[in-house]
Structure formats: structure tokens, C-alpha cells
Amino acid sequence: MTSPEAEEWSDAGSEETGGEMAPSSKSERGGNRKWGPRDHVIRQLDRVKITGQLSSRLFRKLPPRLCVSLRNIVDEEFLQNGHIFLGFTKCGRFVLSYTSSVLDDDYSFYSYTLYWWQFQVHSKLRLIRQVRLFPDEDIYNDLFLTVCEWPSDGSKVIVFGFNTAGNGMLMNMMSDENHRDIYISIVSTPPTSPCPDCRESTSGPCLLHSFMLHTKYQVVYPFPTFQPAFQLKKDHVVLLNTSYSLVACAVSVHQTGDSEPKQILYSKQHQHINTRSCCPSSSSASSSPSTTSQSPRTPNDFHSPLTPDPAASSSPPSTPPAVTRAREFVAGIFRRAQEASGCDSLERGERAGPSRESPSRSSDPESPVWHRTSNETPSRINAANSNEPSYINYTRLQYSLDEVTESIQENEYEDDKISLPFLVTDLNGQHLKPMNDKALFQGQHLIVEQLTLDFEYVINEVIRHDASWSQQFCSFSDYDIVILEMCPETNQVIINIGLLLLAFPGPQDEGQLRPKTHHTSLKVAWDLHTGVFSTLGVGDLIEVKGQTSGSVWSSYRKSCVDMVMKWLVPESGVRYVNRMTNEALHKGCSLKVLADSVRYTWIVL
């Protein structure tokens, strides 16, 4: 499930009629043919007002001077070597392709190589770089590949490889049909010309232009949906649903001369500031010398963590309108979720639980319930800034191309908190060793952050404290997570958790003692800066009668799609997730054109 912006981009070069060039003479254009709704420029401009962006197919055809044939710009030998061309990068300077080959051994492992080609209209494509994807992995069948770019980060691309249910005896021997392998490679983008650091380097490109990260994990049924429009909505960050947890991974390069290393995800300082501002205690409010303490606090004096502070919303005129609209949009999502669930969650939240901070009775009825560590109370959280929720799992590793001294090697980072172990290499395949924060670097170094949210912990906490049917709850058997929204300005990830569970009958059902299978959903917001999650809404129990789990999950995901479409706010024509895929190849067909819809250039295949 992806947003229409990503879908339109991915489909821009896949329409069957896209390969035709525009006729050059007036007679060939059809003479006095009447223009249809799609051809009407005024209608297209009206669409801009409604959606905020031009359609990816503003015009059905392009003039011949903007269309080039692939065979005219690529040597025949490359086409014979099996190059599959995927599309343009967002900058329009590169065209990407890949090749797959079967290694000659007893098990026929697949190997994938990604290629960057420099593009200039009516000039030969020039091969700039080639890298092997998913190294050291045993891949038993052909993968569905998707290459994505972040909205505003052109320094790297991320490649997803999906191992779907395979055919043949080997696949049945080597894998379980209830498990699927996900392969990921993050590869730096080559520069069009060497940067100052590349010129100073004696061993090749600098770290910013020569790093690669690889990882692999397995997902189980119901297999998570692939949502690149949400998973990559925040620059430098990718959200990975591993079936058991949601892992936010941030990858950034610390430049030489920067005063402080970049930290994109979890910040303890941000967490405690947010805790005091969003959940003020009654004692602190009453002792404040400000004018607000001299009169009763109104509900509007307390703010949801998803709702922008009035002081922030009345920010200086320099605040971009897109940021303001994003804050209002996320606040609207929060309000609708709370209206759907009613105010019962607040009344239940007033019961002090051992594993979360209970909101004050005078707090905003639209405030969510913030879940915290099992041994912390609100007073301890405000008093001791060093405390943090026990479920927060955050790691930060550093990598460098420079030679590592013995003193730094002693600080090698070994931590079982790492959710996804990344293999970090340079372009030559040389492994880079991870170091902890104590390691000192003189030059560039790569920072890899991971923040993990455990699904089963979240489910248990939300049911125990926020579900009206918690006394009926027996156990849950399966769950499915869908990302509903990711707001890069507020760093809030909103997820929907579909649950299959066993629950005892309610008090109204007399004489029934056995638990029955039910389906419900939980809406949760996760803050990538504080690591804290909050409950937005808990659904009612719906008994599952004669339905298979497949039909339950199908209906659940359809409802998620409907919800996302109802909440959808059009993105800017520039801030979108660019996606290129080999889906057409697996369907037994081919793209007709590779379309650069920003610069209106086509490569006709």
C-alpha cells in the first residue's frame, strides 16, 4: 500500500501506450479531433489546485526531440549481457540498471549488480559505477527488486529485494513457505564530479560517495506490506517492519570539520523536555509564578504530543507553510482517532498503572496515554533526567575508512541490542568495523542509528491499560502492522495494529464460559525523538465467525487503505519517494519507456 504520489511515479513509465512518439505534422495529429478531459490543459491546471502537483502524465506524448531510443545510447553488448533498465534518478543525471547472474555451483545462487549510467540527451550513456547488491547472501531464487530514493536526500539509494514463495524442490528444501527473506542494500550515489574530499583521498572516493550497507531479515505471515511512501518519508531514515518489531534505521555521514556528530533519531534531552511540556504535573502547574498558575488550567493549556504547541504554531513568518500544514494534518489525525475511540480511554488512563504515567484529571481529554518503563512514576521521570523507558532500544554505531588504531580497536562496539546487524563495506568490499561513541575520528565517518519498537510489548501494554475489554482478554494469536502515516516534521509514526485474539464473553453473555476468537485494532503513535509510544485508539472486539485468517487480514488491510486515502494530504511535486522496480519483468512484460517526468524526457525501450 503506497500513497498515490509514489504510485503515479512508479507507473509513469509503465503504461502500454507510453512508447509512442508524438506526430510531427498537423495532419498526423488528427486534424479537428475533439480534445478529451485528459487533454484539456485547463483541467490539468485545475488538478494542480486540487492535488498540489501536476499529474505525472500531463501530456500523452512528447515531441521526438525529447524522446531517445535506448538502442541509440547503449552499446549492444550491454543489452546482450542482460541489463534490465529501471529508470531515472530524481536528479535526472543518472539512469539505473541491474543484472542478475546464477553462480556456477551446486545450489545455483543468484547474484545482483546495480549500475549507474550518466545521462545526457542524445549522448551515449556513460557507465559511472557498478556495485554488487546483497553480498555474502545465499539467494536461491530471482528477487523482486525495488530501488528507492528519499524525498530530499540524493546522497544514497536503498534497494529492497523480496524473496517471495519460490518454486522447485530446492526452494522447498531451503525455506519455509511461512517465511520470506527481505534483503536490503543502502548504496551511496556517485558524484558527477569529484568532491574536495574525494580529491584529497589517495585510496579512491571519500566515505560519503563510497559506502554500502547490507542486511537481511525474515518476515512471517501475514507478511508486512511494503510501504515505501511512508517507510522513507523522512530523509536519511528507513522504517523496517520485521514482523516482530518496527526498526527505524538512520544512516548519515559526519563530515570533516563538523562541530558535533549528527543524531537523527532518539535524543534523551528531547525526551525529557517533551515529557515536562506534554505531561505537566499539577504541583508544577500550581507552583509556577506565571499568570496561568493563578487561574484554573483549561483543557487547552495542555497539548497532545501530536498537536503543535500554540507558541510553535504562531512561529516566525519564516516557518515554511508545508511544515505548518503537516503539523495541522497530524493533529487532525490524532483528533479523529480520539473522537472515534471516545473519552473512555482517558477515564481508564486515570488508573495509575505500574508501567506508564497516568495523566492528570485536568489534562486535555484529547491527550494520548504515554507508556513508560515499569519502574518509573511521573515524579521520578520529572526528577531524574537520566531515567528512560525500559522498552527503548537504541544503538548508535560509527564507521570510518581510515585505519583504526589499537586504542580505538579496544572500544569496538558489541551490543545485543542491535536489532538488524548491518554489514558495512566500501566499494571494494572491504569491511568497516563498528565503533562506539568513545572512538575518535579525524576524518569522515558513517553513523548508523537504530531505534526499535517491540510490537508484542506495545500490544500487551495498550490492552492492559487502555482497552475497555481488558478483563475479557485471554491471549492474542497473531497480529498485522500497517503504517498509516509518518510525519517528518513532528517525527511521529502512526501505526495500526490488527489483532486476532481470544477473549472471554462479556457480562451480558451469560452461560458462555469459553473464550472465542475476536478481531480488533489498536492505533499507536511512536515518537522517533523520544522513543515513547502513545495510544491513539482501541477498537471494539469483533467476533470472528467462520472466517479464515486470510480473509480477516484482507479486510483489515482494505480498511487501512481506506483510512489512508481519507487522511491523504498531497505531497509537493518535489518531496516524493522515487521508486523503480523490476515488477514488469516478473509479470513477463517490459516497460515501454523510462520517463523523467520532471524534465519531460523519455527513453524509449
Image: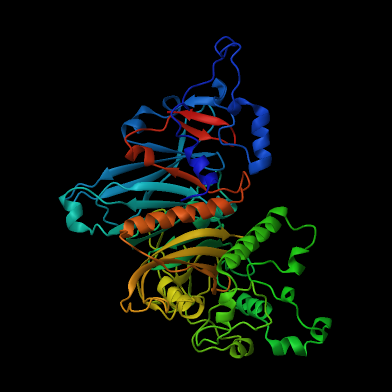
Residue 523 % position (x, y): 51, 66
Total residue callouts: 0
Residue placed most toward the observer, 99 or 32: 32
Question: Where residue 448 sits in the image (x, y, percent)?
Answer: 48, 66
Residue 388 spot, x, y in % from top left: 54, 82
Is residue 426 visible in the rendered structure shown here?
Answer: no
Residue drawn at the location 65% of the way across and 83% of the way down: 361
Q: Nearer the viewer, residue 504 or 334?
A: 504
Looking at the image, is 169 positioned above or below residue 248?
A: above
What residue is at 46 percent from the left and 74 percent from the top? Answer: 458
Q: Is residue 503 visible?
A: yes
255 and 479: which one is in front? 479
Q: In which quadrant is the C terminus drawn?
A: top left
**In the rendered view, how is the structure colored?**
rainbow
- Of residues 517 and 70, the one nearer the viewer is 517
| Quadrant in the picture for residue 411 | bottom left
Q: Is residue 534 left or right of residue 547?
A: right
From the top left corner, tell me how far across and down residue 238 is, in percent: 49, 59
233 shown above or below 581: below
